[in-house]
Image: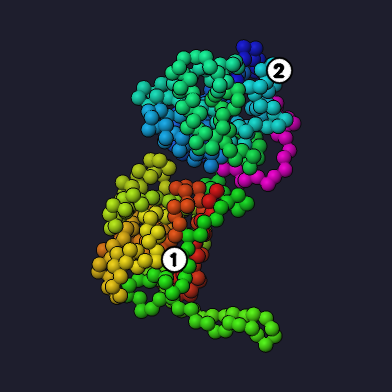
Amino acid sequence: MRTAAAFFVATVLVSALAADGPPKEEGPFRIPDLVELAVLDPAIKLDVRYATANNLVGRPVYTEARAFLERPAAEALRRVNRALGEQGYGLLVFDGYRPWRVTKLFWDVTPAEKRTFVADPAKGSKHNRGCAVDLSLYDLRTGNEVEMPSVYDEMSERSYPTYAGGTKVQREARDLLRAAMEREGFFVYAYEWWHFDFKDWRTYPILDIPFSEIARTAPRRPPLDLAAATSVDLTHAFDAATLYWPNAPSGFELKSLFAGPTPGGWHYEANAFAAPEHGGTHLDAPIHFAKGKAHADAVGLERLVVPAVVIDVSRQAAADPDYRLRVEDVVAWERTNGTVPEGVAVLLRTGWSERWPDRKRYFGDDVPGRTDHLHFPAYGKEAAELLVGARKVAALGLDTPSLDHGPSSDFPVHRVAAAADVPGFENLAHLDRVPATGAWLLALPMKIAGGSGAPLRAVALVP
């Protein structure tokens, strides 16, 4: 949004221009969760012109050169950057979330005939909702910005995404950016090749929070927005086919106590059930492998209702059924997603739940009582020490029978986790439906007093 006739009165603060405040809207809206792009993906470069004098008003309107988007949009943008990286390009971001008062300032200083290039503050901007981003490409080899048919914020027909002028190379770069963004749910603005709106923008409110306040107001954990979340059941049903450890004395038993019509004429059913603690989708309480640690009833909700991250090693596990998560796997995950946050549940996806309830394929052996020929993937001891010790995670979970891989006879991962009072969630299902970051886990076991484990109903809430 550039104009030769821009003006600015130095003594007028941007906040004074927002005296009327943002437009009033009726929800419901999602809970805002603005994510800083440079933190989410350090490979995304920033050129925040509005924190410099190189912009519409001729002086900075942002006090900090930072860029934010709502979490789903930010995650999508990271995927775009990853895909473009395979073609030798990275994303260069000019602007993301924009406080409403800045939108009003731009409207006030823009001549009427140029206002197709700026948002009407009476309606609010998609930037104000954290769902619009201004960006271009840079060359990964040189680090230089890629030339487009117009420069950023130029108010002319050269800025149109359909402009037929410029060089062939410039148009191809513009169209490459557009195609990559549209594959991840962004749509280009009709007058600006650099401006893209995220598909879910209507679900977020208009905000007027200055950048300086975001670090203090943004929650440490992703917000739990029940109205917008999708529920994913991570639990295998308990029935006669439920898998238990090979040397368990019994499996799941359901005994009918009554089923049928009552003397009063209504239908009634009641059952009794019995099962070992450690089978099916279940909790491993820390006491299972560490004396003096928490029993099943004492595992706190702060370890059971938590944000979740998913580390996917299904490719490695397909090649090696005894694969163990390595420190290098965690580091690679963090290179893409950022450091594993303190207080989350780490869920390891191996792809093994697809084998349930075929005992031989799931355990690697189906000889009753035999535990010395088991084959399935799990955590490695060093990776568990990193997650439990340095990262201070709340819980470990996975889609196989045990936190330790099948051939293990000394269960080091169980011992590392239990010593830190970290519970385990075993035999989870459907981890392929849970994103790497952003979801919440509700892992609620039967509250068995004095139990070393318990049947578990686990659900992921995915934004």
- Residue occupying the point 57% across, 43% down: 33
Q: Which residue is mark 1?
A: 281
Q: What colour scheme does the image use?
A: rainbow
Identified by mark 1, the residue type is: Thr
Identified by mark 2, the residue type is: Ala
What number of labels is visible? 2
- Residue occupying the point 35% across, 71% down: 245
Marks 2,1: beta carbons within 8 A: no
Q: Is residue 406 above or below residue 54?
A: below
Where, quadrant-wise, is the N terminus in this rendering? top right
User: Which SS class for mark 1?
Assistant: loop
Decide: few, some or many residues near mark 2? Use Cα within 10 Å; few <14, some 14-19, many ≥20. few
Q: Which residue is mark 2?
A: 112
Residue sitting at the far top:
4
Q: Is residue 104 above or below residue 290?
A: above
Residue 224 in the image, given as x and y percentages of width and height: 57, 51
